Amino acid sequence: MTHPSSASAERIRELHERAASLLTTREERPRLALAQDPRPGFAGDLSQTREALAALRAEVDGERREHLAALERFRADRDRQVAGLVADRDAVAAEAARLRQLAEERRAAIAAVEAELWTIVEELDAERADREAVVAELVADAEARGRQYEEALAAQHDELTALTDGLREELDALRAALAEADEDRREAERATDLLRAEHEREREAAAERAARAELQAQRDEARIAELTVEAERLESTLARTEDEARAAAEAAARDLATLTAAGEETVAALGRSAAAELDAERRRSAEALAAADGRLRAERGRSAQAAAQATERLEEERRRSADALAEAAGRLEAEQASAATMREELAVRGRALQTTEAARAELARRLEAEEDGHRATRGELAARRLEIDRLEAQVRAYQESLVGAQREIAAAQVGLASSQRALDDERVQRGALGARLTLEQHERGELERRVAQVEAAGQAALRAERGLRQEIQRDLQGKLGVLRDELATATGRLREDLAAERTTLNDRIAILEECLAQERTRRAEAEAEREDRDEIRAALAAFGARIERAGEAAEASAARCAELEEELARRDAMLRRVSVVAQELRAELASARAAAQTQDDAHGHDDAPRGDRALEPDAAGVPVPDEAGASTLDALSARLERLKAQARASADPAPASTDA
């Protein structure tokens, strides 16, 4: 909404501009009237001026009434806005009271939840103390069983010492088997040497073929260099020919520049015909080049076919070598299978044949390395053959390009001859054009003389017109002097009227400025009310943030309760797992006792008192295991250590959770 004071100021400026434009038009109108009628009437001008002033007064009164109505509307709008702000303030106060009540309710709920949480924490502490006592009992029981197992292991050590002699005999048998495996390895090495010698012969043959191919490539490169020099010489000859043709064309252009318009049209027509001939020559050259390109593509196709045949031969050689390598690999696989069978037989008694396996792996790696070397050699040969084919194709391409260049030179010479004939024809036509130019120059002289006569007549008419204009100007200057005096008198009267009107307008402007000051004061008050409302909104936002933080604290407490419940569930699972492990330990002890009894019966030792002692339980009621139960005892001791670690881990986090 535009302020009334600014609108009134703009309207006053418009009135001033209209008054100035009216003065300007009133000053110019008598001058124009005198120019049209030598007997002007001043009564009509004064009446029109008075009518204009009356219209201005009526317009100013209308503007004043509009401004007063706008001020009334603005005041009504302001009163409505103030009433709305008061209603908003009351609503905000009611909302603040409701939020305070809600915050009190939330605080009470949070206090109740905290009390429940402390009760749960105390219960958890009591339950943790009970479970720690149970875990301590289980650990003591496990340590006692560990001591019993250590005593049983000490007794078992004596029996293991007796078994060492039997193991030495088995080791002797293993050494004999290892000697046989060494003999097999030597046979495999001899076969590998034979394969290596064969591969060496193939490598030497490939190197000889590569040397021959390289020599042929050097000869091809020398031939290519000769062809390149010949092509450069032909290119220089072609460049000189083009320069001569360009010089002749420039000379012809200089000669054509001296002709007249008609001659230029004729020369342009001849140039177009020459261009058409040159285009025809270019098309013929392009067709010749296309034919040469076709032959080149055909030659490339034949080269590609030859390369494909060579590639097929290489593939055949590669397949034969691969078959030979496959046979060798088959023999090696058979040897490895036999070695694997022997290794499976000897794995039950020991790991003495690891050295043989390492030697065989080294042999396989050497064979693979040699095979990789053969593959690399074949790849190099194929690359060199492809390079030779590429050089041959380049040589053929150079030869064909030389033939095409020679054809282009011949075509250019033919084009130069035709251009020379066209220049001779142009010289003949130039003579005819010279005669026509002489005739046209004579006609131009006649036209120039006629133009001079017309210009002389026009200058005489201009002089007469200039004299008439001077007379008219003298008459107009006299009339304008009279009009200026009359206009000065009318302008003085108009300025007096405008001064009175300006005084009236200044008084009205003062009244409007007072209204504007009052309106600014009211606006400042409304701005202060708006700031108060913003402060109330900020306070409400801060209160809402506090309520959100209280809600987040309640959610954190609920999450902590959930964590404590998970801790209880985890400890229940730990207790169940400890009971299950205890049952498994009892079952494994029973199985160890049964295994010891079974193995003692299977061994059938002569010293019966020793076997009977192994089957009798000790003072703690746990049987002493023999050599078959050693691994079982190791597994049991490891599981006891894991149980101790799990018990310690389950006992450590409990104080931290209680403190939290």
Image (cartoon, grey):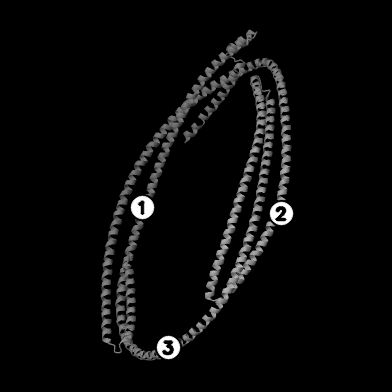
Name the side, left or right, on which 126 lies relative to 306: left
What residue is disc 1 on?
537
Mark 3 to mark 1: distance in Å?
88 Å
Please identify, in this view, whether the residue under mark 1 or under mark 2 is nearer the observer.
2
Dot 3 or dot 1: first in sequence order is 3
User: Residue at horizontal 65%, vertical 8%?
Assistant: 607
Q: Amino acid at mark 1?
A: Arg
Considering the image in quadrants, where does the N terminus appear? bottom left
Could you say which quadrant of the image residue 207 lies in? Answer: top right
Name the side, left or right, on which 521 lies relative to 289: left
User: Residue at horizontal 67%, vertical 48%?
Assistant: 392
For label 1, the SS is helix
Q: Is residue 139 above or below residue 61?
A: above
Depth order, front residue of 651/599? 599
Q: Amino acid at mark 2?
A: Glu
Q: Is residue 185 above or below residue 485?
A: above
